[in-house]
Image (spheres, rainbow, N blue to C red):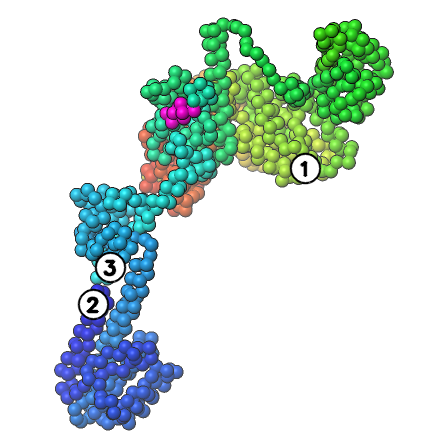
Amino acid sequence: MGNRQELSVFKQECTHINQLARQVLHSLRRIWLRLEGDGAAGCTLVTPPPAPGDGRIEGALRCLTPAAAQEEDALRAFADAAGRLRARFAALPLLLEDGGIAGTVCFERDEGEWTAEEQETLHKLMPLYACAVRSEKLGQDFSLQAWVFNQVVDSMYAYIYVTDVDTDEILYMNRAMKEGLGLDAPEGAVCWKVLQTGMHGRCAFCPVPLLQDKNGPAPSCIWEEHNTRTGRIYENYDSLMRWVDGRTVHFQHSVDVTETRRLYREATTDDLTGAFSRRAGKQKLAALLAGCGGVSICMLDINDLKQVNDTLGHAAGDRLLVQAAQAVQAQLTGGDFLMRLGGDEFVAVLPGVAEDEAQRRICAALRQLQEAEGAQPQAGFCYGIAQFDGAVPLGEALALVDERMYTQKRALHIRRAAERLQREGTHSAPAFSYDCTRLYDALVQSTDDYIYVCDMKTGVFRYPPAMVAEFGLPGEVVENAAAVWGAKVHPLDKQAFLESNQEITDGRTDAHCVEYRAQNRRGEWVWMRCRGHLERDGDGQPTLFAGIITNLGKKNRIDQLTGLFNKFEFQNAIDELSTGAAGPYMVIQLGIDNLRRINALYDRRFGDEVIRIAAQKLQSLLPPDAWAYRLDGDEFGVLLRNGSKDAAGQLFARIRQAFAHQQSYDGKRFFCTLSGGCALYPQDGRSYLELSKSAGYALEYAKQRGKNRMEYYAPQIVAHRERSLELTELLRDSVEHGFRGFEMYYQPVFSGTRALEGAEALARWRCDKYGAVGPAEFIPLLEQSGLIQPVGRWAFAQAVTAQARWGRRLPRFKMGVNLSYLQLEDDEFFPFMWETIQKAGADPKQTILELTESYLAANMERVADRLRQVRRHGVRVAMDDFGTGYSSLGVLKQAPIDIAKIDRTFVNGIQESAFDNAFLRMVVELCRVRGISTCLEGMETEGQWRAAEPMHLDYVQGFLLGRPVPAGQFETQFL
């Protein structure tokens, strides 16, 4: 239809030109066109052409071809040809917009010559003819394009149709769709009447309103349709486009995906329960955890499934699995999903759901399962739930929820055993049998002692592999063992050993217990304690002799709390590697971060359990070429035979991941991380003393730089340590001389309309030797040395005094004071705080204590009551550096705070990062719902201000508005 319209327009233009020309030139006889090149074959004649035999005109026209090198040459050729014509003929070139020549327009009059005025008129007509020629050529192109498009679209294995966006009238439908739906000529019909069944108006799922929404997410959309006419599933691609008549229409491209969805469902769904399969579910969960914005994971283990299968049959077991899956799925919404991990285990995944809400849902599912019709009396499941607020490896996440689920499962088994004992009492057990051939191997693997067995009929002994390796025995099975082993016994102890051994051989005693020294493969004399028992046959003859040899020297080398080798073995191992032919190796010292807080929160006995748990986890993470040792206090040593920084870095990365989340023991939760220091043999030392000292320096440096990290030894660390020691003494000297060198600076805080609201007090310090020392360096030294208490009190008194003075000028003036965690944990600080505020005459409601988010997140349960007490006295609490912690939103929900100070890192990306901008908006809205004020830190540019202004923040601070300055300058500049 569009091509016919274009041709019609062209003909109308040509007719109009002819009429105009005849009106202007009364003597015009006829006009014709000659198109050169590709257009010649499609020439449209406006008026009858000259007679075929008129060679004069044909010859002249042949001279006018686009093959001329340049327009000037073509025009010159044209002029020469035209001069040879009779005066009543006029031939003018048909020029294109780019300067080329498309052909010729010839005019012939009845008689006479063309006057100059008439020739000027003919020249004016030429652009109109050029427009007509372009219109015809365009119509020809459109015709070809339409034919190609129709052929391509009709041959596609897809449904394509076009509708009017206002009337839903079908304007076009390809052949495949017509044949697939059994429609003959649907053009002109309303789409929802012929493409669906049971519809009384536009489909509720029609995408046209979404596409017409100028504020919508995209100019096109992809969606899935379950068609009511065919019962098939289609994946639709919809957009708006311009139709041939200029109006906007709806275009849809549909692909039948029914079989694809069926095959996908079969491949990703557990046939029995309808949950995701193990593989598909883990892939989906891994993707969630990789870009995690918060997800709760619950692992479930169905109780007594094996018993149900064994007693009632597998059909009953399958029914129990289905009932459990249905009960859990009934509690899932939105993007939640359930996967069957295997056998009797499931994993429920709840994105964006807090742990307590997940707990409520799973408990509801458990009740539903237990109350289900036909449910088994013991129907139920054990579960473990964990919430993750950051990117976490899949294996680590599943291991954590599995550990929590097992804790509940273990408690269930213990409780049931006690109930069964109370209900049934003790009675004779059924016959017991076991695989005797496996017994020895199992016992050897379960103890550090050496277990031996002797066949008394043959005198052949069997010793464990560890004893063979330690003492260089010829093998695990030894004939004439008394002589072989006796040769390794110390000469002074050999008599007692042989006599005791002979008494067993002669059958004079059934018990054996003797201590002696034996020489190991390194030539060392080690104290041993050998105990054994003799078994006799039915005739009373000795038949089996078995017992345990305890390496007393090894016992003294084992740390009793952790089971790891102790620090003396650590020294021995380093000395042995250093004096041997070993290549480069790494010495790593690890320390538990903030164990003192855990001891204070619970007690030292619990702290010992934390050390033991950390040791076990550390041991499980070591590669085959590494060994762990317990050193002093909360420190461990690791020897890594692969002497490369890459290997050490990979090991510490695994350690950091393993300690990245809260752990629980005996119903109590705790959180701890490890810091590490690494030294390389021989670059950083050639002896135990040198290597342990270097690794210790590196560990200390890692803790100073923020903990939960590992540092490699470098000479600069020693210089840094020496500087830190000297700075600590200089700080102590300053405190003892009336806080000499300390000064308070104040950074202004403004409202969202740039009105002054208050200030944040910041301590600064300088000394004669080093000049100004930054707070990032001297504050950790104050905390480590205990000087934070006197300096913190001095700073607080200075700040509230300034607040009282400036508050008389500006009654709403607020003062924020940073508080160290050590001050918050000091029971004497709060009485000092009340007394200081009263003495200064400051308003408690305008005093703000600022604490970091990382500290609040790790110690929420312990400090929440204390912070509530502070707020009851009118003092407000601010959470500093918000957004940098591992559980920001969780802290925002739980923390008893008045102000959330959003970290400057989000301001830096507020203009470029959609995430930072969206995060800020979300935090502001959440705080507003909770009644918490918001303060944006780090505002440095007007662009950042413009980006943040629509968020209606309560407070803003940054270099754009004002830098920290001394008190006098603050009064002059801002008050």
Q: Nearer the viewer, residue 898 or 135?
A: 135
Residue type at mark 2 is: Gln
| Residue occupying image coordinates x 20% and y 80% | 46
Please give the range of residues in magenta: 314-323
Residue type at mark 3 is: Trp
**Chain-order first, disc 1 or disc 3:** 3
**Chain-order first, disc 2 or disc 1:** 2
Q: Determine the main secondary structure of the stretch shown in magenta.
A: helix
- Near mark 3 (Cα within 10 A), the count class, few <14, some 14-19 or many ≥20, is some
Whether label 2 touches label 1, CB < 8 Å: no
The verdict on residue 407 being magenta is: no
- Near mark 2 (Cα within 10 A), the count class, few <14, some 14-19 or many ≥20, is few
| Residue occupying image coordinates x 67% and y 29% | 627
Residue type at mark 1 is: Asn
Question: In the drawing, does residue 2 fall left or right of residue 591?
Answer: left
Q: Nearer the viewer, residue 319 or 382?
A: 319
Residue 968: x percent and y percent? 45, 34
Residue denoted by label 3: 243
Q: Nearer the viewer, residue 399 or 958?
A: 399
Question: In the drawing, does residue 408 fall left or right of residue 434?
Answer: left
Residue denoted by label 2: 5
Residue 584 visible in the shown view:
yes
Q: Residue furthest front?
A: 539
- Asked which quadrant contains residue 845, the reply is top left
Residue denoted by label 1: 642
Residue 584: x percent and y percent? 71, 38
Q: Quadrant of the N terminus?
A: bottom left
Q: Secondary structure at mark 2?
A: helix
